[in-house]
Image (cartoon, rainbow, N blue to C red):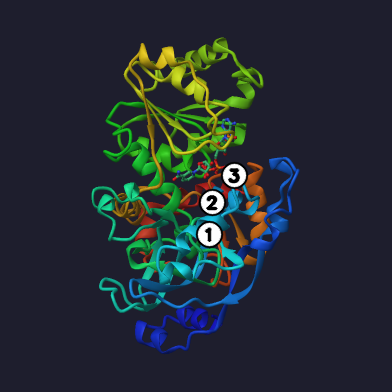
């Protein structure tokens, strides 16, 4: 893949890239089927991605007619790579087996190794015979909704497709590698004012937050809505608060350190709660929640924002869901896409039905939502939340950082890009948007 990297960095056009011979193997971060039991008996926190994530050469898979090869310049760590690397809640090889039964092309994914990663920026180097809208040389980012067009249920909202999958988590050949194989309908234009690593970190979390808050498939936020955002400087939260601000809402961010409070203030979020300093104890023991602590949170929100939040942006799950349902305004919506702290949820249903609240499930985003969210990145209306960058060879350490909540925003990973700062094609827009705004999270990175 080095020949592609050199050509891309030298500004080669599509014809030149298409003329470079494809290698037989490529460098990729992967877990191994033979190691899925390596952490048996350990607690979640003791399971170490640095031991399970390997970086070495793997064979280049064949290209299906509706797919493209992308030379990956940079990628990102998402929480799903943490889940894959600690084999929780299930080893991801089961997902690959299921995909393998779908078609001859699906069968390619069933391998001893699972190449992980659900974000990428890079350059298209080959397209399959059915691909119409993309060609070698196109600079792209990749969204992770992997869906075919032969399922009737996918034609209203592709996230409803019965065989919808997340690329690099429920499929093989993910983005934490020098090459990736994606469906053409996962491609989107790369923002020309961003570097490879700034462009690589957005698609998964930005699109997810966009669907949860802005889309008619989510909470349909309107001007003036107060939105409680858990983990407001994290992967999802860092985009969620920007969507709330852009849409004329009032974000109330919850974070866990004074530095994160400061970061959010700089981003324009006035109402911020430091949950560590506040010392909330929503659970008095493993089985019992404490309503007085929910009430204390509600009071703190009202003191900052003037009223209860119309929307709660939920993802921590078990630890916070009882408080989220309680704190949400009468008639409001708790929109949830995850359960990092545990998926068996408990809340007091009386607070839900008597006050006519809704809990809405959401998962990633369809192509349209991902495209619209990406347009906001391209227009400089949503900033990348890149805080730290690791080389691909240190992907285990990068995943470890996310696993232990030691990061802000997103962690980027350099693949073919030899160092940071490359890939900006539109310096005028960069200047207009503002270096300080684009690199805000970077200044707070370790
Ligand atoms: P991050 O780790 O980047 O951010 C999550 C933040 O949540 C943390 O930084 C932390 O912020 C806060 N948090 C963690 N645990 C708790 C807790 N017990 N109570 C309160 N706050 C907590 O992860 P992401 O934002 O990228 O992802 C969050 C979850 O969403 C993951 O489980 C991920 O798998 C899932 N996800 C789901 C998607 C989907 O499409 N369904 C898409 C993307 C992510 P702080 O300490 O500052 O409060």
Residue 423 % position (x, y): 45, 69
**Closer to the camera: disc 3 or disc 1?**
3
In the image, is 180 to the left or to the right of 67? right
On the rendering, which quadrant does ligand 1 occupy? Answer: top right
Q: Element at badge 1?
A: loop
Mark 3 vs 2: CB contact within 8 A? no
Q: Position of residue 434 (x, y in %)?
A: 41, 52
12 and 292: which one is in front? 292
**Disc 2, ligand 1: is the CB inside 8 Å?**
yes
* Separation of marks 3 and 2 at Cα, in angstroms: 16 Å
- The circle drawn on residue 351 is none
Residue that carries the numbered disc 3 in the rendered image: 89
For disc 2, the marked residue is: 78
* Residue drawn at point x = 57 percent, y = 48 percent: 443
The residue that appears at 49% across and 38% down in the rendered structure is: 338
- Mark 1 packing: few (<14 Cα in 10 Å), some, or many (20+)? many
Q: Which mark, by number, is residue 117?
A: 1
Q: Reading the chain from its start, which is encountered first: label 2 or label 1?
A: 2
Marker count (numbered)? 3
Residue at screen point 31% across, 51% down: 158
Q: Secondary structure at mark 3?
A: loop
Q: Earlier in the sequence, mark 3 or mark 1?
A: 3
Q: In the figure, 141 relative to 224: above or below?
A: below
């Amino acid at each position: 893949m080095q020949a592609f990297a050199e050509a891309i960095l030298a500004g080669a056009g599509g014809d030149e890239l298409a003329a470079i011979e494809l290698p037989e193997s490529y460098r990729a971060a992967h877990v191994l089927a033979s190691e899925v039991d390596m952490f048996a008996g350990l607690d979640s926190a003791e399971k170490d991605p640095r031991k399970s994530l390997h970086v070495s050469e793997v064979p280049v898979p064949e290209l299906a007619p509706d797919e493209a090869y992308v030379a990956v310049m940079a990628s990102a760590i998402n929480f799903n790579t943490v889940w894959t690397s600690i084999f929780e809640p299930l080893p991801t090889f089961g997902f690959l087996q299921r995909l393998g039964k779908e078609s001859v092309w699906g069968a390619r994914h069933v391998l001893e190794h699972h190449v992980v990663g659900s974000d990428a920026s890079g350059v298209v180097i080959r397209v399959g015979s059915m691909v119409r809208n993309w060609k070698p040389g196109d600079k792209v980012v990749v969204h992770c909704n992997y869906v075919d067009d032969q399922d009737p249920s996918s034609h209203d909202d592709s996230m409803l497709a019965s065989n919808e999958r997340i690329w690099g988590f429920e499929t093989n050949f993910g983005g934490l590698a020098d090459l990736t194989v994606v469906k053409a309908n996962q491609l989107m234009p790369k923002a020309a004012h961003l570097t490879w690593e700034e462009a690589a970190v957005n698609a998964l979390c930005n699109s997810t937050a966009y669907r949860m808050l802005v889309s008619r498939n989510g909470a349909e936020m309107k001007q003036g809505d107060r939105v409680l955002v858990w983990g407001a400087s994290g992967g999802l939260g860092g985009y969620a608060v920007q969507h709330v601000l852009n849409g004329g809402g009032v974000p109330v961010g919850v974070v866990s350190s004074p530095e994160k409070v400061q970061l959010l203030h700089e981003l324009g979020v006035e109402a911020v709660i430091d949950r560590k300093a506040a010392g909330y104890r929503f659970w008095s023991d493993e089985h019992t929640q404490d309503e007085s602590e929910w009430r204390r949170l509600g009071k703190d929100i009202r003191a900052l924002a003037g009223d209860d939040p119309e929307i709660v942006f939920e993802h921590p799950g078990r630890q916070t869901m009882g408080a989220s349902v309680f704190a949400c305004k009468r008639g409001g919506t708790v929109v949830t896409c995850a359960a990092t702290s545990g998926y068996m949820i408990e809340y007091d249903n009386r607070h839900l039905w008597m006050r006519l609240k809704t809990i809405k499930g959401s998962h990633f985003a369809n192509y349209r939502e991902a495209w619209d969210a990406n347009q906001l990145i391209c227009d400089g209306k949503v900033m990348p939340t890149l805080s730290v960058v690791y080389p691909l060879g240190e992907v285990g350490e990068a995943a470890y950082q996310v696993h232990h909540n030691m990061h802000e925003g997103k962690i980027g990973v350099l693949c073919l890009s030899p160092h940071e700062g490359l890939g900006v094609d539109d310096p005028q827009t960069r200047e207009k948007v503002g270096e300080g705004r684009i690199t805000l999270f970077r200044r707070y990175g370790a």
